[in-house]
Image (spheres, rainbow, N blue to C red):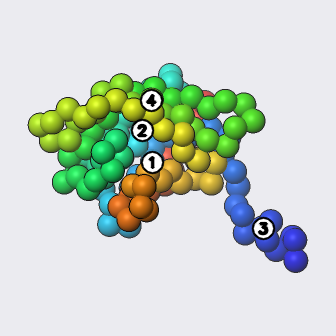
């Protein structure tokens, strides 16, 4: 039984570097680069203000992963939704399963990104 459960878990990523695309009815691309920077473009959810966006949330920042940690730290340095600037923030999000999900505190609104193009390092 343990072998079957372990087989369903899938591979665990060691690096978040690559292109992550929004899934289901969401829209946007999260690009995580090996130089320690990231961008989010044309996203349908604003994770900094926990609200839907009209495919117009954009952000840039830096990222890091600490050894022995299961989460990715994203530090948003600049962000906007349409014509409005959005305050800075940082998030720790799991990534090792191949998905990154941002959601509001009530878990009603969200966006999920899946790794679609793993960059070679």
Q: Closer to the observer: label 1 or label 4?
A: 4
- Position of residue 49 in the picture relative to residue 22 (left or right): left
Number of numbered labels in the structure image: 4
Q: Where is residue 41, by image quadrant? A: top left
Helix, strand or loop for disc 4:
strand
Q: Which mark is residue 20?
A: 1
Between the residue at mark 3 and the residue at mark 4, the CA separation in whole angstroms equals 34 Å
Q: Which of labels 4 and 2 is toward the front?
A: 4
In the image, is residue 78 above or below residue 118? above
Nearer-N-terminus badge (2/3): 3
Q: Measuring 49% from the left and 47% from the top, which residue is drawn there?
A: 117
Does residue 98 appear left or right of residue 10 in this picture?
left
Under tag 2, what secondary structure?
strand
Q: Residues within 10 Å of mark 4 (few under 14, many from 20)?
A: some
In the depicted structure, whether residue 85 falls above or below residue 41: above
| Distance of label 2 from label 3 (alpha carbons) | 29 Å
| Other residues around mark 3 within 10 Å, as few (<14) / some (14–19) / many (≥20) | few
Q: Which residue is mark 4?
A: 75
Specify the farthest residue to the bottom: 1
**x and y percentages locating residue 26 in the rendered image:** 33, 60
**Residue carrying label 2:** 31
- Towards the viewer: 39 or 47: 47
Quote the CA–CA distance across marks 1 and 2.
Answer: 6 Å
| Residue 55 spot, x, y in % from top left | 22, 52
């Amino acid at each position: 039984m343990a072998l079957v459960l372990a087989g369903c878990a899938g591979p665990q990523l060691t690096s978040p570097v690559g292109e992550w695309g929004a899934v289901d009815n969401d829209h946007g691309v999260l690009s995580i680069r090996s130089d320690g920077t990231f961008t989010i473009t044309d996203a349908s959810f604003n994770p900094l203000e926990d609200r839907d966006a009209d495919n117009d949330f954009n952000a840039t920042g830096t990222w890091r992963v600490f050894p022995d940690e299961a989460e990715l730290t994203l530090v948003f340095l600049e962000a906007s939704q349409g014509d409005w600037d959005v305050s800075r923030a940082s998030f720790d999000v799991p990534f090792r399963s191949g998905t990154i999900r941002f959601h509001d505190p009530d878990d009603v609104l969200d966006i999920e990104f899946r790794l679609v193009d793993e960059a070679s390092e």
